[in-house]
């Protein structure tokens, strides 16, 4: 059997030793036979120099068409795909290329041509972050986490703020889209939680904030964002469209954050939360643990941050809406209820990411959790039964056909009570009983307690009635104020006033 091939290093050792030793000894020291030594001396070339040039084992199937037909197309537009060139060949000469047998060969040829003669490629320049220099913000979809609230899947995003140097992060749950309102509100929360301001703030061009906006609205968002950054003394920068790596410090952290949340949910044993606030608290606690591991770097960065301004700036959008005779007003195609005294009044509504606040002049008169319109065009209602209960008590039959009837029920127990009443009683009696229950909850301020009593009655197979449940409520403590000391004015002081007037 042939031995191991001789290497260039062995030949070098042999040639050096051959100057001092015999052929046999030098061959032994180099690790090969005396016969191999005689062959080397007959042909002193190194083994690597004696390797035969490897040629093609089969004819080139593209030899006749590469230079004349395909290369001009590639030089004209290097973006053309190999499969497109193959289809072009099959149309030009169906007999020469009847099938896709040459596809892999053509793909390798095109790939090699691009590597040698293709256009210049973009180069990513890694940056060395400086303390206090840059912060980055981004929105990331959290749907893959599978979080549910009371068994209902939660469609939401996470606002993610990261300092480039230390990696300190702030995360907020965002129920709506990537709007300027969500950015401004949560960015301010991040800065005030951090306790300082970086020199520059980078985003992904706020592309989501411009979605479905006309040119004037997009320009308005840009001006407001520039004014926001000017208030905090930050330079506003944006990565180039389609260049996600320019926002890489936060893009990479997005994935790390979601992996950490996913693992924490696995340890928790459930992805369902009773309330939205419970999920927000879960996120905050995990982020706090992650930030504790960065304390040394954060201390270095804090020394380089600028101080916060005296106050926060505007982080909401404002719309003006009139309260109609239906007992509410519209904001972004969503109906919000208002006290009946406000019918006909124009309200200034501050729209935040998670709530709306309506003002009459400088007085805040209505607050609601923020709702989003449905894509199918069905009107969404956000109704507080306390706003309309006085009118509904005078007209209880309006309950059955009200377009926002289901929104009037403050808890699921009240909704279950209506389902039982409307099934077992005539419509007139069902409406009267249901309105009486809502009035009792409002008048006695016992919404939660009454809900528990209603659930107990329904579990017994009975129908709830306000008159029967009222005695079971814990009486509210109505304490009158104690004696109020009154200091009487000395009558002689009036004489002094009269004398001064005279």
Image (cartoon, rainbow, N blue to C red):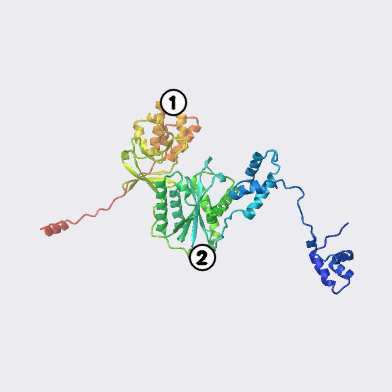
Give how far across and how far down residue 469 sits, in percent: 42, 34
Q: Is residue 487 above or below residue 468?
A: below
| Residue drawn at 66 percent across, 52 percent down | 112
Query: Viewer-proximal residue, 240 or 496?
Result: 240
- Mark 2 falls on what kind of element? helix
Q: Residue furthest top?
A: 426
Q: Nearer the viewer, residue 310 or 21?
A: 21
Q: Quadrant of the C terminus?
A: bottom left
Nearer to me, 216 or 301: 216
Q: Which residue is mark 2?
A: 300
Earlier in the chain: of badge 1 and badge 2, it is 2
Q: Categorize mark 2 by other alpha carbons within 10 Å: few (<14), some (14-19), many (20+).
A: some
Q: Position of residue 38 (x, y in %)?
A: 88, 66
Q: Which residue is mark 1?
A: 425
Which quarter of the picture shows residue 116?
A: bottom right
Callouts 1 and 2 close, C-beta under 8 Å: no
Residue 271: tell me if it is visible. Answer: no
Question: Where residue 74 sits in the image (x, y, percent)?
Answer: 61, 49
Q: Is residue 20 visible?
A: yes
Point out the residue furthest to the front here.
68
Seen at 40% across and 60% down, the residue is 309
Out of 172 and 284, give the one closest to the viewer: 172
Residue located 75% across and 47% down the image: 59
Residue 469 relative to residue 6: left or right: left
């Amino acid at each position: 059997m042939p031995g191991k091939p001789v290497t260039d290093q062995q030949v070098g050792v042999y040639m050096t030793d051959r100057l001092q030793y015999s052929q046999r000894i030098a061959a032994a020291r180099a690790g090969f036979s005396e016969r191999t030594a005689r062959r080397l001396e007959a042909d002193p070339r190194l083994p690597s120099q004696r390797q035969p040039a490897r040629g093609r084992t089969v004819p080139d199937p593209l030899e006749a068409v590469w230079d004349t037909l395909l290369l001009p197309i590639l030089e004209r537009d290097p973006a053309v795909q190999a499969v497109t060139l193959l289809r072009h060949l099959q149309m030009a000469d169906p007999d020469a290329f009847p099938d896709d047998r040459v596809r892999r060969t053509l793909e390798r040829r095109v790939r090699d041509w691009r590597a040698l003669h293709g256009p210049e490629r973009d180069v990513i320049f890694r940056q060395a972050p400086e303390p206090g220099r840059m912060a980055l913000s981004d929105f990331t979809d959290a749907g893959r986490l599978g979080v549910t609230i009371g068994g209902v899947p939660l469609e939401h995003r996470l606002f993610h703020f990261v300092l480039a140097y230390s990696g300190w992060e702030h995360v907020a749950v965002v129920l709506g889209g990537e709007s300027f309102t969500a950015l401004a509100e949560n960015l301010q929360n991040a800065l005030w939680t951090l306790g300082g301001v970086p020199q520059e703030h980078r985003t992904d061009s706020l592309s989501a904030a411009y979605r479905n906006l006309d040119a004037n609205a997009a320009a308005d968002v840009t001006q407001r964002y520039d004014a926001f950054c000017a208030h905090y003394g930050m330079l506003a920068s944006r990565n180039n469209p389609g260049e996600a790596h320019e926002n890489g410090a936060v893009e990479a952290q997005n994935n790390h954050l979601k992996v950490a949340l996913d693992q924490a949910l696995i340890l928790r044993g459930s992805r369902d939360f009773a309330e939205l606030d419970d999920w927000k608290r879960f996120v905050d606690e995990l982020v706090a643990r992650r930030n504790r591991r960065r304390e040394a770097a954060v201390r270095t960065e804090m020394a380089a941050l600028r101080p916060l301004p005296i106050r926060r700036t505007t982080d909401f959008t404002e719309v003006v809406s009139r309260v109609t005779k239906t007992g509410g007003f519209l904001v972004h195609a969503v109906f919000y209820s208002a006290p009946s005294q406000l019918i006909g009044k124009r309200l200034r509504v501050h729209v935040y990411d998670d709530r709306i606040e309506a003002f009459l002049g400088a007085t805040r008169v209505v607050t609601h959790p923020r709702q989003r319109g449905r894509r199918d065009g069905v009107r969404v209602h956000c109704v507080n039964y306390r706003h309309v209960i006085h009118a509904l008590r005078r007209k209880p039959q309006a309950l059955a056909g009200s377009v926002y009837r289901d929104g009037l029920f403050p808890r699921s127990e009240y909704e279950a009570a209506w389902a039982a009443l409307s099934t077992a009683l005539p419509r007139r009696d069902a409406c009267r009983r249901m309105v009486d229950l809502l009035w009792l909850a409002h008048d006695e301020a016992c919404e939660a307690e009454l809900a528990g009593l209603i659930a107990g009655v329904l579990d017994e197979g009975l129908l709830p009635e306000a008159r029967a449940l009222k005695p079971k409520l814990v009486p509210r403590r109505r304490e009158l104020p104690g004696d109020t000391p009154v200091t009487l004015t000395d009558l002689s002081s009036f004489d002094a006033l009269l004398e001064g007037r005279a």
